[in-house]
Amino acid sequence: MSRPPLIELIAGPTASGKSALAMARAREIGAVILNADSQQLYADLRVLTARPSIEDETEIEHRLYGVADAGEAWSVGRWSRAVMPILSELAEAGRPALLVGGTGLYFSALTKGLADIPDVPVEVRDTVEQAFDAEGEAAFRSRLSTLDPQAAQRIEMGDRQRLIRAMAVATHTGRALSEWSSDTTPLLAPGSWTGSVVEPDRAALYDRGNRRVESMIEHGALDEVQALLRRNLDPTLPAMKAVGVRELSAHLGGSISRDDAIAATQQATRNYAKRQLTWFRNQTADWPRAA
């Protein structure tokens, strides 16, 4: 009988229960859990990003959680350069690895390859976002079709984030994102991994997200955001864009009430989960699903 792959990928939207599933699976096969979530990289955001608890990290070895400072800007490339040596180390030791998270680009880099796309300046992306909002999706998509017809055809209706990304890259580099993306080699060899997506019923997912935000508030999320604000960090840093930072910052600055900040964070969480669901349905349609 052939040996099963030592690498398992467990993807899913925020609040889907993927971390609990990973813990159960790690106990079963003696695996190390590796972070594949861009927000859980940051040490400053344990509460707000619902990182695994200290108890879970004590019971099962976890890697790449809380390894970055909020003042750093980790990209998918930097994460890839960090995770691959760990996977090699575990493979040499014959230890299974579970990569768990909600950042689709991390899983795409592993299984499809990482395109060496130049960084798009913030001002370019902001201009493209403003154009999308002013033009509407239909007109924006029509304009994108002249720069990147493959992306315009491939990207699902309502996927604002990916449409803006495609337009920003084409505008900044003069080359279609589809062309950049074709110049890739998967980081993981075919047959060396298995993947699954945790995809609960949407109503149940949103309810979990709402309750998670309430729990975060009870366990110090406001203190966490206040500590970030005291550092006067660049607002364009990834950590400062984490779900809930903007909403809770508004309350701490006195512009909205605590209840309104909680409601806004819950809405932002639902929006984020919806974008993640859309991404995984489009990009990992052939992966098995778990509720």
Image (spheres, grey):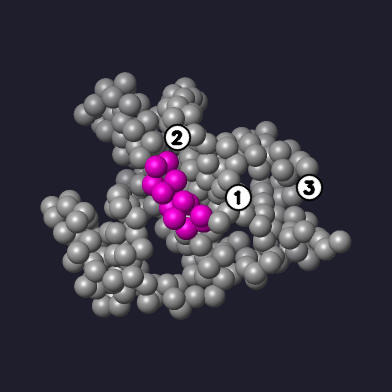
Residue linked to disc 3: 29
What's the distance in space between the residues labelled 1 and 2, CA to CA?
17 Å
Residue linked to disc 2: 202
With 240 as the anchor, is 115 left or right in this view?
right
Q: Considering the numbered disc 1 on the image, is that residue within a helix, a strand or a loop? A: loop
- Please state the horizontal and vertical placement of residue 36, each as a whole percent of the image: 55, 53
Question: Which numbered mark, 1 or 3, is in the foreground of this view?
Answer: 1
With 52 as the anchor, is 220 left or right in this view?
left
Q: Amino acid at mark 2?
A: Arg
Sequence-wise, the earlier of marks 1 and 2 is: 2
Image quadrant where residue 143 sits: bottom left
The quadrant of the image that shows the C terminus is: top right
Give the magenta range.
Answer: 273-285
- Please state the horizontal and vertical placement of residue 279, each as a whole percent of the image: 43, 52
Q: Considering the numbered disc 3 on the image, is that residue within a helix, a strand or a loop? A: helix
User: In this view of the protein, can residue 31 be seen by the observer?
Assistant: yes
Residue furthest right as drawn:
1
User: In this view of the protein, can residue 252 be seen by the observer?
Assistant: no
Residue at 44 percent across and 76 percent down: it is: 182
- Please state the horizontal and vertical placement of residue 198, each as a whole percent of the image: 56, 43
Sequence-wise, the earlier of marks 1 and 3 is: 3
Q: Amino acid at mark 1?
A: Pro
What's the distance in space between the residues labelled 3 and 2, CA to CA?
30 Å
Tell me: residue 90, above or below residue 200.
Answer: below
Q: Amino acid at mark 3?
A: Ile
Residue linked to disc 1: 288
Tell me: residue 195, above or below residue 119.
Answer: above
